[in-house]
Amino acid sequence: MTWWGHSTAWIEDSGTGLLTDPVLTGRLAHLRRMAGPAPRLPGAPDAILLSHLHADHFHCASLRAVPGNPLLIVPKGAREFTARALGREAAGRCVELAPGEQTEVGAVRVRAVPARHDGTRGPWSRDRAMAVGFVVEGQARAWYAGDTGLFDEMSDLGPLDLALIPVGGWGPTLGAHGHLDARDGAEALRRVKASWAVPVHYGTLWPIGMGRVRRHMFDEPGARFAEFAAQAAPDSRVRVLAHGETLDLGAAA
């Protein structure tokens, strides 16, 4: 898998390419990309995994920029919003999944799993769908959490080969409700029993004009997660990736 910042990752398994919650632009509303190169996709993905409707995960401009005509694997209830935001053609490529439901993409299986997070588009919008995570099963079993707080059923997800765990946010006032910080991310890793973990959802986007405000919340969550994980989940290995860096589980094993 390759991490392109925030929650955007390219996962490739058994010749199938999956893209998670793509944000491919240098700016998103009041947020600016403050680290890493602009994402460079290796080609057209077979499917895009969209965890929920928040604009830093379901980013319409980025979705329009993705090459090809990939499946859009979305939470239950998101097809109607997709039709309005991206058009009927995109809505026709949607596969809606509720937790426990799954679909086949090439040689892998994608299963929606619970997430503890608000499913609305935003406080200004009536659009709503579930918030979910995904488990991808091919040669490896990988969990992409989306946005979530801790929940009891996490222990049912493992054992896993790889966990992409959100450990931060995009601003100094982002609340803990429905999110994981570095310490809670380590607890999530303990629960899911993943052989490898990569911290995501930090160190990429920050409010314009606030580059020096609580900068530790931007820079440090990945390394802090690794420190906490060493105590909470000593049997798991953590790789803190730079933007654009790739973890090859076959080579790492």
Image: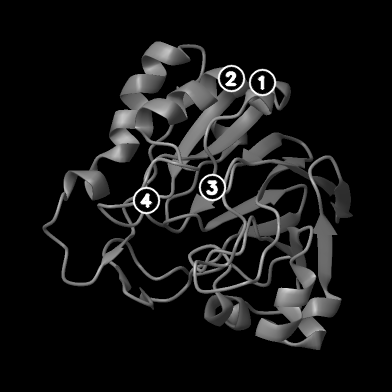
Residue 166 percent coordinates (x, y): 47, 42
Sequence-first tag of 1 and 3: 3
232 relative position to 59: left or right: left
Circles 2, 1 touching at the beta carbon (< 8 Å): yes
Q: Amino acid at mark 4?
A: Gly
Distance from disc 4 to disc 1, alpha carbons, whole Å, reads 24 Å
Residue 150 vertical placement versus 89 (above, below): above
Residue under numbered circle 4? 169
Q: How is the image coloured?
A: one colour
As measured in the structure, the alpha-carbon distance from the residue carrying label 1 to the one carrying label 3 is 17 Å
What is the distance, in whole Å, between disc 3 and disc 2 at their CAs?
16 Å
First-in-chain label (3 vs 4) = 3
Q: Are marks 1 and 3 in contact (CB under 8 Å)?
A: no
Does label 3 or label 2 sit earlier along the sequence?
Answer: 3
Crowdedness near tag 4: few (<14), some (14–19) or many (≥20) residues, C-alpha within 10 Å = many
* Frontmost residue, 68 versus 75: 75
The amino acid pointed to by label 2 is Arg
Q: What residue is rendered at 69% in x and 23% in y?
A: 158
Q: Dot 2: within a 10 Å radius of its alpha carbon, few (fewer than 14), some, or many (20 or more) residues?
A: many
For the residue labelled by badge 1, is the local secondary structure a helix, a strand or a loop?
helix
Residue at the spot x=66%, y=83% of the render? 85
Total tally of numbered discs in the picture = 4
> In the structure shown, which secondary structural element does the residue marked by tag 4 occupy?
loop
Q: Amino acid at mark 1?
A: Ser
Residue at (64, 23) in percent of width and height: 152
Residue at the image position 43 percent from the left and 56 percent from the top:
6
Q: Nearer the viewer, residue 111 or 121?
A: 121
Q: Earlier in the sequence, mark 4 or mark 2?
A: 4
What residue would you read off at disc 1? 155
Q: Which residue is mark 3?
A: 147
Q: Position of residue 144 (x, y in %)?
A: 61, 44
